[in-house]
């Protein structure tokens, strides 16, 4: 939880030689082993470290999706926001690209949790978010943290004081900066919106090298643009996040369905009356061309030893008779439920295989149509050891303009989190993703800015952002005029 002590001016080091600067003629780093040719721009003064070591660069070249390779020229381990500002200004002078990399995961198993190279900086400079790892304060209502802190670290620190973030992703070992930059969705989105919607203030280094504080009342436009803004305007280095009282326990209701209409109807019922603070839907693809099954996992929270009565919580729902299960667990155990899943995937050898995920926001009025067309195309082998989530939320819970949702009051997350069998060729799955995306957008859907959708064109992005495209472009040119930041989202050519 404490920040590494970095007070000296660190050397810019390569594998076997000290780097003296950037060769603007050859567009490579110049070291003490080189015979200088061309113009050398001296290395910037930093409190942290910047390395060109091949092993470090290779570690930042792959992400969770394992579908692309985006090797940076160098990796910055910043001591703070000033180092990032220094590097961005240096990059602007030399036409280099820069992107923050969350290095999510546990132990030594760290990598960007983007799925299609979105956090990459090919030929540029990757910034290691894990170097910014301090929790500064926790109060009864909020926490201020460096954005390299993971949600797991913040959750445990908050729980120690009887508090919790209101919105958590299923997998907690993700950097806070990474998720709030794309949104951050979880099972409480219907109550609290995205993780980005729980942010009260940010410190951000813009693409023109300025260190700014932004809140709903100060630098307001930048605040709303940066949150769920895909890293296009600045690198968020610190955030103040809402906290709420944490319950002690969770009662988990698992409901099964054989019928799509009933599954969607019951999900809409739960959304409308809000009886559960946590709600997730899952579609279970069956073998041998059998029709899918469906599952709702709804969670009620409670304190003490007396769990809530299930009868009123299940009234008006129509799951399969005699298949409903009820399980009691601690709140912390439930929030960490994905860890067991992740350990299993790793032990089976699926974790490091290519993972062509697809995440969409479907308009509620078209969700049944999309699912009816799509589900027959999916087989258990397409899912592998993964899962397909599908659950609703009210779109007005998403408060930042670049968290784009369909133009309806209710949308469904369609989250195809595939873990295909190792050695599976991902190309057909990427083609499938593109085709599903094309059909979904015909029905009014929008993409969530993770997942793997190949061949996104400028027209695709303009269509995605719709009326926000002009504002997006204006804000980009204001805060990142050289288009230095996060190039691999490919929003701007």
Image (tube, rainbow, N blue to C red):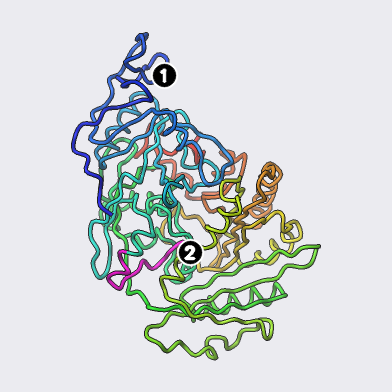
> Quarter of the image holding residue 443?
bottom right
Indicate which disc residue 27 carries.
1
Q: Is residue 376 left or right of residue 253?
A: right
Q: Is residue 95 left or right of residue 212?
A: right
121 over 220 or under it: above or below = above
* Disc 2 secondary structure class: loop
x and y percent of residue 249 in the render? 42, 79
> Quarter of the image holding residue 41?
top left
Write the residue at 50% across / 47% down.
Answer: 114
Relative depth, front residue between 252 and 85: 252
x and y percent of residue 483 in the render? 41, 34
Relative depth, front residue between 377 and 398: 377
Residue 466 appears in the rendering: no
Indicate which disc residue 167 carries.
none
x and y percent of residue 65 in the render? 56, 46
Relative depth, front residue between 176 and 9: 9
Q: Is residue 141 magenta?
A: no
Determine the residue located farthest toward the front in the rendered image: 347
Q: What separation in Å lies between label 2 and label 1 (alpha carbons)? A: 42 Å
* Start-end of magenta stretch: 157-169
Relative depth, front residue between 227 and 283: 283
Packing grade of label 1 (10 A; few <14, some 14-19, many >=20) is some
Circle 2 residue: 186
Q: Is residue 164 magenta?
A: yes
Do labels 2 and 1 touch, CB within 8 Å? no
Residue 222 appears in the rendering: yes
């Amino acid at each position: 939880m404490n920040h590494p002590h970095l007070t000296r001016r660190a050397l810019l080091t390569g594998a076997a030689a000290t780097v003296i600067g950037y060769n603007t003629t050859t567009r490579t780093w110049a070291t003490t082993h080189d015979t200088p040719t061309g113009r050398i721009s001296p290395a910037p003064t930093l409190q942290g470290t910047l390395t060109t070591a091949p092993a470090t660069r290779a570690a930042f070249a792959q992400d969770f999706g394992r579908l692309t390779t985006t090797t940076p020229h160098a990796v910055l381990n910043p001591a703070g926001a000033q180092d990032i500002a220094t590097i961005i200004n240096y990059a602007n002078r030399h036409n280099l690209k820069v992107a923050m990399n969350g290095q999510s995961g546990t132990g030594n198993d760290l990598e960007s949790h983007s799925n299609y190279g979105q956090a990459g900086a090919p030929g540029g400079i990757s910034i290691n978010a894990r170097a910014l790892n301090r929790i500064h304060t926790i109060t009864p209502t909020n926490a201020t943290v460096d954005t390299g802190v993971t949600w797991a670290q913040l959750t445990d620190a908050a729980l120690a004081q009887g508090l919790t973030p209101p919105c958590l992703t299923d997998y907690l070992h993700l950097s806070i900066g990474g998720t709030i930059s794309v949104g951050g969705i979880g099972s409480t989105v219907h109550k609290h919106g995205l993780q980005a919607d729980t942010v009260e203030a940010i410190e951000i280094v813009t693409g023109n090298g300025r260190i700014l504080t932004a809140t709903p009342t100060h630098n307001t436009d930048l605040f709303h643009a940066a949150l769920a803004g895909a890293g296009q305007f600045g690198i968020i280095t610190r955030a103040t996040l809402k906290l709420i009282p944490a319950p002690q326990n969770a009662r988990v209701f698992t409901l099964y369905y054989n019928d799509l209409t009933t599954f969607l109807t019951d999900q809409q019922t739960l959304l409308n009356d809000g009886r559960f603070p946590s709600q997730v839907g899952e579609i279970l693809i069956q073998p041998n061309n059998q029709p899918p099954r469906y599952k709702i996992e709804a969670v009620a929270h409670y304190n003490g030893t007396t769990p809530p009565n299930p009868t009123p919580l299940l009234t008006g729902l129509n799951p399969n008779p005699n298949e409903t299960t009820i399980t009691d667990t601690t709140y912390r155990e439930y929030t960490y439920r994905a860890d067991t899943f992740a350990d299993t995937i790793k032990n089976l050898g699926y974790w490091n295989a290519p993972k062509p995920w697809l995440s969409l926001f479907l308009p509620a009025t078209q969700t049944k149509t999309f699912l009816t067309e799509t589900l027959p195309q999916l087989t258990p082998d397409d899912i592998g050891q993964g899962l397909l989530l599908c659950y609703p939320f009210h779109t007005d819970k998403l408060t930042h303009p670049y968290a784009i949702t369909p133009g309806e009051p209710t949308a469904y997350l369609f989250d195809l989190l595939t873990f295909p069998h190792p050695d599976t060729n991902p190309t057909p799955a990427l083609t499938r993703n593109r085709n599903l995306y094309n059909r979904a957008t015909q029905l009014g859907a929008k993409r969530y800015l993770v997942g793997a959708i190949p061949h996104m064109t400028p027209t695709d992005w303009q269509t995605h952002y719709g009326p926000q495209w002009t504002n997006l472009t204006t804000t980009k040119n204001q805060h990142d005029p050289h288009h230095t930041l996060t190039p691999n989202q490919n929003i701007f050519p």
